[in-house]
Amino acid sequence: MAELADNELVKKLAELKLEHEAYSHPACMTADELVANVPLASDKETHTKNLFLRDKKHGLFLVTHATSTAFNTKKLGALLKLQGKVNLRMADEALLEKHLKVKPGCVGPLCIVNDEAKEVTMVLDQALMDYDYIHSHPLRNDASVKMTPDALKKYLADSGIEAVVLDFGKDLPAPEPKKPVAAAAGGGGAKQANPGGMKKNAKKGETLLALQWKKEENFSGWYSDVIVLSEMISYYDISGCYILRPWSYKIWELIQVWFNAEIEKLGVENAYFPLFVSQDRLEKEKDHVEGFSPEVAWVTKSGEAELAKQIAIRPTSETIMYPAFSDWIQSHRDLPLKLNQWSNVVRWEFKDPTPFLRTREFLWQEGHTAHATFEEANEMVMAALDLYTRVYQELLCVPVIPGHKTEKEKFAGGHTTTTVEAYIPISGRAIQGATSHHLGQNFGKMFDIKYQTATGGTEIAWQTSWGLTTRTIGVMVMVHGDDTGLVMPPRVSPLQAVIIPIVSKKVTLQDATPYCEAVLADLKSKGIRAKFDDRSIYNPGWKYAHWEQKGVPIRIEVGPRDIENKTVRCVIRYNGDKIDMPVEALGDALVTKLDEIQTAMFEKAKGVRDDHVVQVTEWKDFVPNLEKHNLVLAPWCSGKNQEAEEWVKKTSREESLKNLGEEGEDERTATSVAAKTLCIPFDQPELPEGTKCIATGEPATCWVLWGRSY
């Protein structure tokens, strides 16, 4: 392509007369994104994963391996025969630009020619030599170069680079899944045996339509498989953006329907505000904009013309809504003003994107209210948080812990922040479920939201904001999913029951249809979301697997004997129970059964969560409990002590990395091994007199919940 012909490395390949093909593709920051978004012609071709590592004693290394190769940094030193203590870790961005003149996410073996001082050791994966073609970036992550292994070796040799070729599978022990921190979806923590998240090769006769990873074997790979194969998402050609397919969007719609009915009871009305915000408005509240500044996406051009002033795409809507609040609120009679909007938000963060959990664009609801008093605003904050607790616990069957955020973790520019925190058992990580903020009068002062009181005075309004996102769906998947696929809580399942006929020569599909349609009509009359799967191109076994993978709570099987006996067989997705039930009053019976499933799923998840919340009063027990996948309740001196909070984060990271035998972690990781405060729980255990803060040794005033977090 013309724009790639001027690329320095592509030109060098041409000068060396080496066979190659340069092509453009969607920008991909990671190898996982390349595998997902840039499919290759055959399994004899591979993308590469590239690591720029440093060791204080042994120097710098550029390691290039196939995305399917299991790479272990601990073994790299032994394979290189490095002497003495070896602490290989990711080099920082400054070193990368200094030595290889390339940005993060754009690294490939070709950039080694920029190491003019020859201070970087090039390490190649032996497995790459077995592929017909290797694909790798030429200093940019929106393009790749396709070449043979021989062409790559000649390129390096002609450039004066002596590469070390290693067999990364040599003498590598089997991974010990219980010892390191399990890698979470999105990466981070200890590395999995297959860091690229590649699927295992299917054995002969197996289908790749089934999940290729077990949940406990490779959580990241399992999660990716589940959400794609259950038809929840499809990947898009812009990194961090995903297509929500009907199955996942219906879940969001069901949450919307429930939530709208509840906020209407609170006097909240729905509205919609523009997507764009001027720079002046966005930057009006200093603390607020500083909290979002790194993530703001800007529109700078209209066609080919530069805009006179750049325009931001909303990262949140306070600065969009509040000028209107200022216009609308003039008198105490205009209060309270309670609005909600369902919209999309763009936050252009560069940490590892994970569908539903961490994306550059996501869907949410955001409520914004204005009140005459602090107390009224506080009541609204707590009412919204209670709804979020109910969304997770009553709809999604996910237990949450409500509480206040510390000063360090509160919403930028707000007075206080409340939160509900969920727990993901396999990764041992917490995840912020939703937040509700008391904004105080700060934004009212900035945007001149004043009103005339009943006595003729002038006051600033007290405000709140609160939001819930499509992250809810990802949390639900991680908590309940199993090695077959999704396990859907009935209240948010797009389908609650699916009817599958078992046809034969004796009873054809045409024969079974009236019976199945009668069952379907009965279920629908009771408000059950149900479907009769009458597709003739698939056999019953395929249908069973398909709907199990999508997590439908109840499968209803109808065979010749069922028709004869006027019964059906119900198979319960979450526990596998098989129950023969009479067709008479089946709808009423299944309404009860769905409620039983909903309750049982919540109680099961709550039991697992409760087993992993521990109280710790001494620092020596803090990190060991994180390693056991626990959330830690620890005595604390003050939610405002940001310095001590930072000490815990730094020290827990250092101790965790030491336990893993690693010196550092990628600063871009979305899942650090460090602990952070999750909340100061509303439900406080008894705090014995004389209890000391776990960090400072000062008298403790409360218990704080800590954990590794997404």
Image (tube, rainbow, N blue to C red):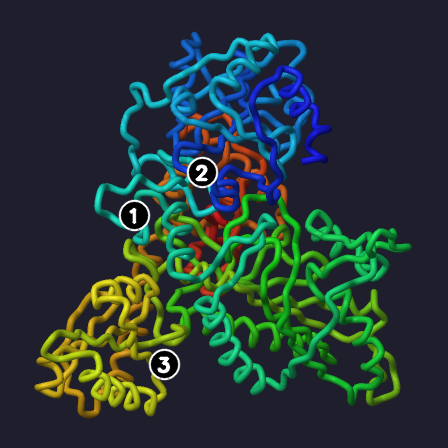
What residue is pinned by disc 1? Answer: 214
- Depth order, front residue of 322/120: 120
Residue 649: x and y, percent? Answer: 54, 40
Left or right: where does residue 170 sit relative to residue 393?
A: left
What residue is pinned by disc 2? Answer: 189
Q: Amino acid at mark 1?
A: Lys
Residue 516: x and y, percent? Answer: 23, 84
Of labels 3 and 2, earlier in sequence is: 2
Left or right: where does residue 505 sit relative to residue 457?
A: left
Q: Going 36% across and 42% down the picture, which residue do you hit? A: 199
What residue is pinned by disc 3? Answer: 529
For discs 1 and 2, the disc positioned in front in the rendered view = 1
**Label 1 – label 2 distance at C-alpha:** 19 Å
Say which quarter of the image contains residue 588: bottom left
143 shown above or below 223: above
**Label 3 – label 2 distance at C-alpha:** 40 Å
